Image (cartoon, rainbow, N blue to C red):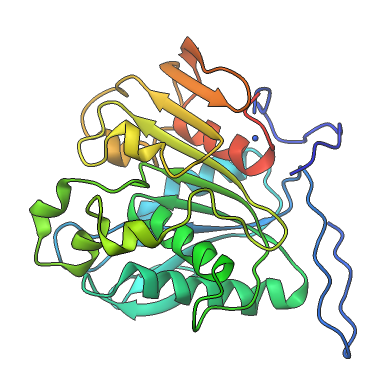
Amino acid sequence: MKQRGTALAVTGLTALGVMLGAATPTQAAAAPPRNNSNTEDVLLVHGIDWKGTASYDCKSTWKNAKRELSDRRWKGKVRSVAFYKKDKNCDLRIASGNVNTKIKDLGKALAKKIDSEYTSKGKSVDLVGHSMGGLIIRAAITGVAKADSGFPSKLYVEDVVTLGAPHDGTGSGAFCFWATQCTDMVKGSNFIEWLRKNPQSSHGTDWTAIASDKDEAVGEDTATGGGVKHWVRYKNLPGDGDHSKLRTVRSGTHKLTYRNLPNAQKSTNTGEAPLDWMVRGLYWQKLR
């Protein structure tokens, strides 16, 4: 997103990184402008169900993220995504799969939904992915960028924020080796090797990755891999279970290190919460 220098009407956004031309019936929708704004729709993509029941309650999973965006006066729609057959209380369904549905296929389904809901209408969208959800997003954009079979010809995705996503793969596949989605995520798998680093949609995409050094499921190195330009690494969020807390913690001050290329990384003992940085990543081009 290019900086416009306009003030953000979002409370507390002090640190971080449309009018859309209507398509005529006889020509494809023009690419929307890239800018800093809080008017983009946001799609929230959850992760794998480690228990194997292939079921998420989107309302409880994304309650804090939706509340954070609402409190920051985000003007675009915020829509949770369902891809397991048993998912419930979600806003948008892309598939009815299970833990053996390939992540690449879920990426293709997400790409098709983005195309039909946004790109084909000349609109762009922002995306947030927790854990495997970040890889589903990356697969969607990679497949389009590579012009793989079955993917749309283009996508307009302006910003992506991932929360504890294993961009470079994980060694935790052994915990659910029986599930295709787990083996897809193992470091060196065909799927991980197929993904592009920092994949770009048809009008450019700005990536931000958020991680914790105490994430019990996804290490901070892989969670900030994948060639992203902007990342935040927390130093042990309060309590247990940092993997889930990356998508739930909204308050407090925290020890963290952040990087915004081409600048050097910086550290602070009074950093903001993960969901605060999530909103910044959706708004700004740079973590500032």
- Where's residue 45, x and y in %? 44, 59
Residue drawn at the location 53% of the way across and 72% of the way down: 111
Asked whether the viewer can see residue 46, the reply is: no
- Where's residue 262, x and y in %? 63, 26
Image quarter in which the N terminus is found: top right
Left or right position of 3 against 71: right
The quadrant in which residue 285 appears is: top right
Asked whether the viewer can see residue 131, the reply is: yes
Left or right position of 156 against 129: right
Residue drawn at the location 86% of the way across and 79% of the way down: 23
Front-most of residues 213 and 168: 168
Q: Is residue 212 above or below residue 23?
A: above
Front-most of residues 25 and 93: 25
Toward the bottom, the furthest residue is: 26
Q: Is residue 31 above or below residue 37?
A: below
Left or right position of 126 against 163: right
Residue drawn at the location 47% of the way across and 39% of the way down: 209
- Where's residue 205, x and y in %? 64, 51
Q: Is residue 246 above or below residue 140?
A: above
Image quarter in which the C terminus is found: top right
Please count the marks in the image: 0
Residue drawn at the location 74% of the way across and 67% of the way down: 123
Toward the top, the furthest residue is: 269
